[in-house]
Image (tube, rainbow, N blue to C red):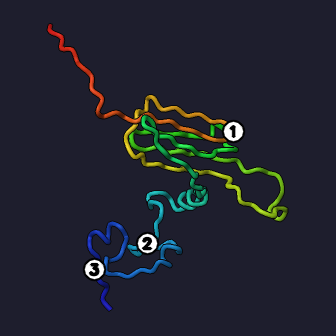
Amino acid sequence: MAKEKRSLFEWLTGGSSAGDDFAFDDLETGGSAYGAKATLPTTLPRERRDTVEEEREPEGELAVDVYQTPTHIVIKAMIAGVKPEDLDVSITRDLVTLRGKREKHTEGTSGDFFFQELYWGAFSRTIVLPQEVEIEEAEATEKHGLLIIRLPKLDKGRQAKLKVKSN
């Protein structure tokens, strides 16, 4: 049986042709719509790829409330149990990313729990803002485990008079 020649796109991506079928089960088993399992770049030595894959810890997604006032966009998130040095807040004009880590408590063993619903470990959340904000004037406060980020809206209609100087 002759092997079918792959297109340049298929060769570059390691995928299969667009006509190949896939099932949603492929997504659960690590497959993709292109027929290839997502892997780390092969430029890493095999033993390093194994180590990186083992070190990769799944991140939880932080629950947030996002709302607006006439002058600000406000983001609220419960971050109880997170030390300020373990919290990273990155802001651009239209995006906010919150990353942090809750250290796992050491009390009890898995057999001692009746319920174990709290999330421990790394978490992140990226929020696309509904409009641009003034990043230099943003404020973040934390009280009793509630993080509040106040982002002043960028006033695109604001005008200023510019004086022309003559030399």
Q: Position of residue 148 (x, y in %)?
A: 57, 38
Q: Residues within 10 Å of mark 1 (few under 14, many from 20)?
A: few
**Which residue is label 1 attached to?**
144
Residue 54 to residue 148: above or below: below
Residue 24 to residue 134: above or below: below
Q: Position of residue 60 (x, y in %)?
A: 59, 56
Look at label 2 and name its amino acid. Answer: Ser
Q: Is residue 90 left or right of residue 113?
A: left
Look at label 1 and name its amino acid. Answer: His
Helix, strand or loop at mark 1:
loop
Q: Residues within 10 Å of mark 2 (few under 14, many from 20)?
A: some
**Which residue is label 3 attached to?**
5
Residue 153 to residue 103: above or below: above
Examine the image and state in which quarter residue 55 appears. bottom right
Which callout, 2 or 3, points at the residue further toward the start of the chain?
A: 3
What residue is shown at x 79% (from left), y 51% (from top)?
A: 106
**Number of labelled discs?**
3
Q: Tell me whether the residue at label 2 lies in contact with that at label 3, contact meaning CB atoms closer than 8 angstroms.
A: no
Q: Is residue 5 left or right of residue 46?
A: left
**Which residue is label 2 attached to?**
32
Q: Position of residue 101 (x, y in %)?
A: 63, 47
Q: Residue furthest bottom?
A: 1
- Residue sitting nearer the eye, 54 or 136: 136
